[in-house]
Image (tube, grey):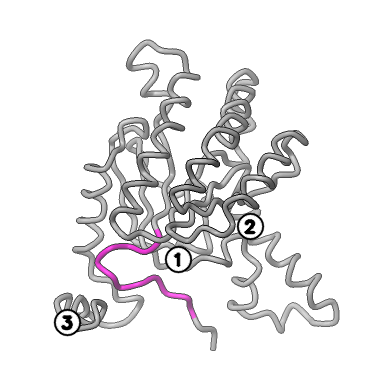
Amino acid sequence: MAIHQFPTLNPVPQHIAVIMDGNRRWAQQRSLPVAMGHASGARRVRDLVKACTDRGVKFLTLFAFSTENWKRPEDEVSGLMGLLSLYLQKEVHDMATQGVCLKIIGDTSGFSTRIQSLIRDAQANTAHNSAITLTIAINYGGRWDMLQAFKGWQAAHPGKSAEQLTESDLASHLSTAYAPEPDLLVRTGGEARVSNFMLWQLAYTELYFTDVLWPAFGAAELDQAIASYAQRDRRFGGGSMDKSTTALKVSGI
């Protein structure tokens, strides 16, 4: 029988995943270029990382660029790549001083050699940090993740049949194998779908959808999401649990 890596029962989610949606609409509402919306969204990341750290969240995973986003206009994609390059250069020092461990997941082979080098350096320079692990998913898709996990398992076990593959085996080869499964998924921008994000990892995750556009999503909105999460009855397929008893057990009382 497979053993699931269930998310935690802590009233504060230990792992929050975010689909950052609404940059373009935020810019359009203000008659600004789309690039300004993406730049404002990138600046919001720093605020959210600090807010999560202050609240005891240990893992934050952000969906920044999907495998489908290559279909966007060429100038917008080019702008996003430039923004990614700038972010990797400017933010790493602050991450190092604030204890942020940065990880990048996704198929980075499609990026320029310059960006690939910046990704390697940023991860290496923050690898020793432990206050919070910030994962940024770029050129990422949940189906891609499961496919590459299977290929990774097969490469590691060339003599084994696929019938011998277990859920825990596959999970250990996912791009987020270093982190627990998300407790809470937040999607900004008013849409209510997961859009091919962490399909395996979100199996037992609580979902929170908000109309707030990503560049406007701050600490107050994060607190609303966490408050909603704290009210959920997380049964993981079992019976209902007493929230007050669970909270006491989690806190060690």
Which of the labelled discs sits on residue 203, or is there none?
Answer: 1
> Measuring 78% from the left and 81% from the top, which residue is drawn there?
161
For badge 1, the amino acid type reads Ala
Q: Is 145 on the left-hand or right-hand side of 129? A: right
Q: Nearer the viewer, residue 95 or 234?
A: 95
Q: Is residue 103 above or below residue 19?
A: below
Disc 3 packing (10 Å; few <14; some 14–19; many ≥20)? few
The quadrant of the image that shows the C terminus is bottom left
Q: Nearer the viewer, residue 103 or 190?
A: 103
Res 15 → quadrant: bottom left
Quick one: SS at disc 3?
helix
For badge 2, the amino acid type reads Asp
Disc 2 marks which residue? Answer: 145
Which of the labelled discs sits on residue 240, or is there none?
Answer: none
For badge 3, the amino acid type reads Thr
> Measuring 41% from the left and 12% from the top, which residue is drawn there?
32
Q: What is the C-alpha distance between the residues marked 1 and 2? A: 14 Å
Task: From the top left corner, tell me how far across and down residue 2 is, in percent.
Answer: 54, 84
Quick one: SS at disc 1?
loop
Q: Is residue 156 above or below residue 206?
A: below
Q: Is 92 on the left-hand or right-hand side of 246? A: right
Does the stretch in magenta take in 40? no
Disc 3 marks which residue? Answer: 245
Residue that sits furthest to the front in the current view: 97
Q: What is the C-alpha distance between the residues marked 3 and 2? A: 37 Å
Disc 1 packing (10 Å; few <14; some 14–19; many ≥20)? some
Q: Which residues are magenta?
A: 4-15
